[in-house]
């Protein structure tokens, strides 16, 4: 969470509190995108996890093709899965018996998201340590994050502790692919974990790295999101279109702050299944200027959205008073 203060009196010394205005919280890049853009393919993700937990139900297009060259549609129930099955038949439960089972399924997406975030943050930390030459141990990083995390129950903590070995293996797999790519490409690190703030747009964020690679100055972001089979999501390699918008905002703010232009945007996808993709914006037909134009359109959409929301809520408050 970031806060910004504008200097209001330049005659006073920097350390004088009266030289600065009231603190305000700028909009974070991630929140801005989440509030403005719909993530196709992720909208039904919680429902899919719930159905999978309750029934072992799956419904997707396979990577395998049929005789006509079309993806084979996979529809059915996973064997041995589903909390509502018993001996091949649906259980007959009272409302009291069904409530905790259904509640657990409704929260499956939260558990999955937290788990993914845990492993992802460890991979992210490992990458930061590696590119800056700091010593680290993935097991130590992950164990520390599990121990320091807040849990609602002791059972949740015990479950997290029990899965450390499995999760560390996934983190090491993802990081290993990044390490190999870094050694092969040999980029020059110009900066890491740069905090940026735009006075023009009142937006802030932190990008992962600035690199010199292939004769270009590049803003890079390390991502650990899973790939998606959904054509609507359009992320078969774990690179979502919103990543380019986010990086464009960083490039735009960096130029505002320093006057330095960015030549390309790089998304490095280190996935927990061991797959890896490094993708430049230019590889999908986008210049940095294209991405910045796109980002500015998103920012404008957000501003108008917030303006209309405020006005509609004011009208609602007036209706409540009058009624």
Image (cartoon, rainbow, N blue to C red):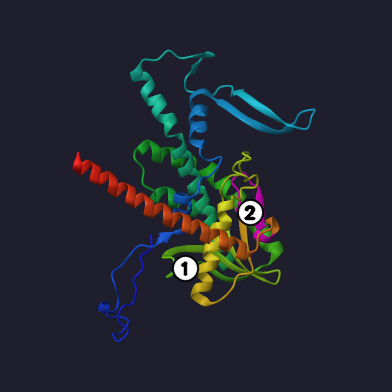
Q: Nearer the viewer, residue 155 or 279?
A: 279
Can you give x and y, in whole percent of width and height, for residue 72 in the image? Answer: 71, 29
Q: Is residue 281 magenta?
A: yes
Mark 1: give few (<14), some (14-19) or many (20+) Cα within 10 Å. some
Label 1, label 2: how far apart the Cα atoms are: 29 Å
Residue tagged by mark 2?
176
Can you give x and y, in whole percent of width and height, for residue 172 in the image? Answer: 59, 50
Mark 2: give few (<14), some (14-19) or many (20+) Cα within 10 Å. some
Above/below status of 73 relative to 123: above
Q: Earlier in the sequence, mark 1 or mark 2?
A: 2
Residue interval drawn in magenta: 269-282
Q: Can residue 16 be seen in this view?
A: yes
Furthest toward the bottom, the residue is 11
Question: Judging from the image, what secondary structure is the residue with disc 2 in?
Answer: helix
Horizontally, residue 196 falls left or right of residue 148, namely right
Disc 1 versus disc 2: nearer the observer:
1
């Amino acid at each position: 969470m970031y806060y910004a203060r504008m200097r209001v009196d330049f005659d006073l010394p920097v350390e004088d509190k009266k030289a600065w205005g009231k603190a305000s919280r700028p909009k974070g890049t991630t929140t801005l995108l989440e509030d403005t853009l719909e993530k196709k393919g992720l909208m039904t993700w919680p429902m899919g996890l719930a159905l999978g937990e309750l029934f072992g139900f799956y419904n997707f297009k396979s990577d395998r093709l049929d005789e006509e060259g079309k993806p084979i549609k996979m529809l059915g129930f996973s064997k041995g899965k589903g909390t509502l099955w018993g001996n091949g038949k649906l259980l007959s439960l009272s409302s009291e018996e069904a409530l905790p089972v259904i509640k657990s399924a409704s929260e499956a997406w939260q558990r999955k998201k937290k788990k993914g975030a845990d492993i992802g943050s460890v991979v992210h930390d490992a990458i930061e340590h590696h590119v800056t030459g700091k010593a680290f141990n993935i097991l130590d990083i992950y164990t520390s994050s599990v121990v320091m995390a807040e849990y609602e129950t002791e059972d949740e903590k015990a479950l997290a502790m029990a899965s450390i070995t499995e999760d560390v293996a996934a983190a090491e797999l993802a990081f290993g692919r990044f390490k190999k790519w870094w050694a092969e490409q040999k980029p020059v690190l110009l900066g890491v974990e740069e905090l940026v703030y735009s006075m023009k747009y009142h937006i802030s964020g932190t990008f992962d790295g600035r690199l010199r690679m292939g004769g270009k100055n590049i803003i890079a972001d390390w991502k650990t999101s899973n790939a998606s089979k959904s054509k609507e999501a359009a992320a078969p390699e774990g690179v979502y279109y919103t990543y380019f918008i986010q990086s464009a905002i960083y490039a735009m703010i960096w130029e505002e702050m320093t006057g330095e232009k960015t030549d390309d945007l790089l998304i490095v996808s280190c996935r927990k299944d061991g797959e890896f993709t490094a993708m430049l914006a230019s590889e999908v037909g986008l210049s940095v200027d294209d991405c910045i134009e796109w980002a500015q359109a998103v920012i404008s959409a957000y501003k108008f959205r917030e303006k209309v929301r405020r006005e509609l809520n004011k009208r609602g408050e007036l209706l409540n008073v009058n009624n």
